[in-house]
């Protein structure tokens, strides 16, 4: 009898992780069946998502409130779907806010299905108490970073450092910049800037005005400026609408291959804080990151952050050295972003030094030079073989 794996994904970065896990696991278990909720990359593999995950993809306390009824409805729907399918294993990917509430519901229903969580909550940055909660709700944890397991192992949770997928993702898309630029109609002699305002509605709503302001200032000095905006399919139309009538020439591209070709083609990038910074570093693209929430959430984040003032993973791994310039919370202003980007465009050697430092940091995130997706598939395969006899 084939094994049934129920996957819970809540946002675009988790969608890519889960899709690679699916491919690697199918090589070990060709007849494995996948169910649950996922995004466009998983869908391209034939996965049928229970609903569009854009409905629950939101960050911030205040930002969640308007969507709370819909999120609660989807939680009940996922719980009922799991009860109906009766999977051999549940794999939850990132999105700990949604996932933790789902797992609490399953525990109250006395579910005996083993649970693996993929991507540890960043307890080393804030809310360290979540480590104990994770250990209580899941049977095994797969981490992306080598420093994460000790935070959870002290509560008896079995952890596996499987590695960060960023290098694997970038390597899967060989460079073909010339063909990409021709396909997108990008002039050869332009100054090409990538703008990445995020993959959630709340992100793009807050960041696009700031990023457009910074770009408009840059265009004064670079009349040949051309903007590339990589996006996920679910947000592409909203982003196109937000940039309608924008004076600087631009285009929106969709798809993982297009995303990485854009990074390689660009001379610089302005991006929302998150995994994208690692992707840009892997493509050796100089960049700055920015982020802001609602006023209430900004206030709360300032209280809860426990490890320094920096939020970029590369900077944190390098002991709070600001290799990648950050403009978060109160610093997320168009003038500040413009000033730094203009400075680095005027001093390409400094920009290149920063990105080479960032690239070197990425080498620490792959254990034993093996593919993270294969490592993750090994863990899932092991748990599937043990089934309900899994010991925490």
Image (spheres, helix red, strand yellow):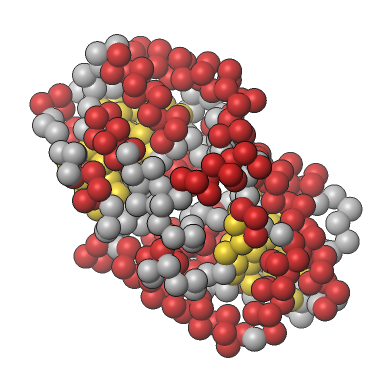
Question: Looking at the image, which residue sits at the far front?
Answer: 303
Q: Residue at point 24% right, 62% down? A: 367
Q: Nearer the viewer, residue 181 or 73?
A: 73
Give percent across and percent down for residue 322. 49, 71
Give percent across and percent down for residue 235. 66, 42
Left or right position of 189 against 230: right
Q: Assign the C terminus to one quadrant of the image.
A: top left
Q: Nearer the viewer, residue 125 or 72?
A: 125
Can the viewer see residue 318 in this picture?
yes
Can the viewer see residue 115 in this picture?
no
Above/below status of 163 relative to 281: above
Q: Residue at point 29% right, 40% down? A: 131
Above/below status of 247 relative to 62: below
Left or right position of 130 against 14: left
Which quarter of the figure has residue 313?
A: bottom left
Q: Nearer the viewer, residue 367 or 64?
A: 64
Above/below status of 260 relative to 102: below
Q: Residue at point 29% right, 11% down? A: 109
Left or right position of 200 against 242: left
The mark tally for this picture is 0
Q: Assign the N terminus to one quadrant of the image.
A: top left
Above/below status of 362 relative to 380: below
Q: Residue at point 76% right, 76% down? A: 190
Left or right position of 201 against 170: right
Which quarter of the figure has residue 99?
A: top left
Give percent across and percent down for residue 289. 59, 62
Give percent across and percent down for residue 250. 78, 61
């Amino acid at each position: 009898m084939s094994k049934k794996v129920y996957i819970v994904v809540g946002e675009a970065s988790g969608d890519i992780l889960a899709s690679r896990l699916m491919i690697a696991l199918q090589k070990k278990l060709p007849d494995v069946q996948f169910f649950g909720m996922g995004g466009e990359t998983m869908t391209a593999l034939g996965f049928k998502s229970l609903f569009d995950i854009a409905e629950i993809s939101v960050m911030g306390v205040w930002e969640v409130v308007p969507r709370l009824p819909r999120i609660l409805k989807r939680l009940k729907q996922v719980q009922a779907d799991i009860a109906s399918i009766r999977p051999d294993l549940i794999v939850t990917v990132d999105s700990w806010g949604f996932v933790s509430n789902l797992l609490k519901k399953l525990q109250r229903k006395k579910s005996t299905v083993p649970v693996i969580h993929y991507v540890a909550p960043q307890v080393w940055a804030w809310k360290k108490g979540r480590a104990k909660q994770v250990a209580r709700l899941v049977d095994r944890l797969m981490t992306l970073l080598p420093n994460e397991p000790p935070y959870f192992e002290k509560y008896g949770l079995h952890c596996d450092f499987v590695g960060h997928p960023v290098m694997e993702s970038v390597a899967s898309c060989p460079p073909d910049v010339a063909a990409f630029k021709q396909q997108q109609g990008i002039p050869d002699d332009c100054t090409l800037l990538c703008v990445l305002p995020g993959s959630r509605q709340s992100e793009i709503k807050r960041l696009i005005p700031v990023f457009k302001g910074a770009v408009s200032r840059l265009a004064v000095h670079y009349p040949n400026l051309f903007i590339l905006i990589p996006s996920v399919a679910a947000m592409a139309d909203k982003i196109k609408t937000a940039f309608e009538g924008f004076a600087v020439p631009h285009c929106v591209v969709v798809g993982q291959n297009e995303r990485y070709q854009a990074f390689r083609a660009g001379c610089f990038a302005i991006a929302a804080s998150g995994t994208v910074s690692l992707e840009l570093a892997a493509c050796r693209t100089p960049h700055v990151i920015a982020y802001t929430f609602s006023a209430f959430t900004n206030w709360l984040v300032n209280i809860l952050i426990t490890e320094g003032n920096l939020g970029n993973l590369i900077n944190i791994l390098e002991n709070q050295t600001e290799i990648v310039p950050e403009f978060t919370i109160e610093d997320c202003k168009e003038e500040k972003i413009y000033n730094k980007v203009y400075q680095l465009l005027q001093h390409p050697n400094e920009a290149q030094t920063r990105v080479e430092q960032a690239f070197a940091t990425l080498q620490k995130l792959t254990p034993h030079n093996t593919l993270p997706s294969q490592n993750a598939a090994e863990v899932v395969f092991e748990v599937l073989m043990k089934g309900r006899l899994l010991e925490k």
